[in-house]
Amino acid sequence: MINLESFPYLGIKAAKFFELFNGCYVLIDKYEYIFYRVDKKEKIICIELILSTKENLIQKIQNYFH
């Protein structure tokens, strides 16, 4: 079980990477960047985007929004 009191804040604030993800956090795994938001009221974590480090990150972001 995930403890929402500590887990969501293990990630880095994603705005350091992209202004577009202001308010998101990012967990960096060996092969992926996982961008997520924390809904404190509902006590849930919403995954926004998962990027693979094996792919061109900029192209993947552009494709996601077009």
Image: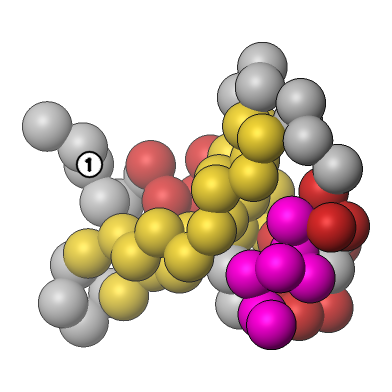
Quarter-of-image position of residue 55? top right
Residue drawn at the location 28% of the way across and 74% of the way down: 40
Q: Which of the two residues, 35 or 13, is positioned nearer the viewer here?
A: 35
Q: Residues in magenta?
A: 60-66
Where residue 22 appears, as percent x and y from the top left, is 70, 78
Determine whether the residue tagged by mark 1 lies in a helix, strand or loop.
loop
Q: Which of the two residues, 6 or 51, is positioned nearer the viewer here?
A: 51
Quarter-of-image position of residue 37? bottom left
**Image-based side of 44 in relation to 64, left or right:** left
- Residue pointed to by mark 1: 3
Residue drawn at the location 31% of the way across and 60% of the way down: 45
Q: Which of the two residues, 13 or 32, is positioned nearer the viewer here?
A: 32
Q: Which residue is situated farthest in the top direction here?
A: 30
Amino acid bearing label 1:
Asn
Where residue 36 appears, as percent x and y from the top left, is 48, 60
In which quadrant of the rendered image does the N terminus lie? Answer: top left
**Image-based side of 50 in relation to 64, left or right:** left
Quarter-of-image position of residue 32? top right
Residue drawn at the location 42% of the way across and 51% of the way down: 8
Residue drawn at the location 82% of the way across and 48% of the way down: 57
Determine if residue 20 is in view.
yes
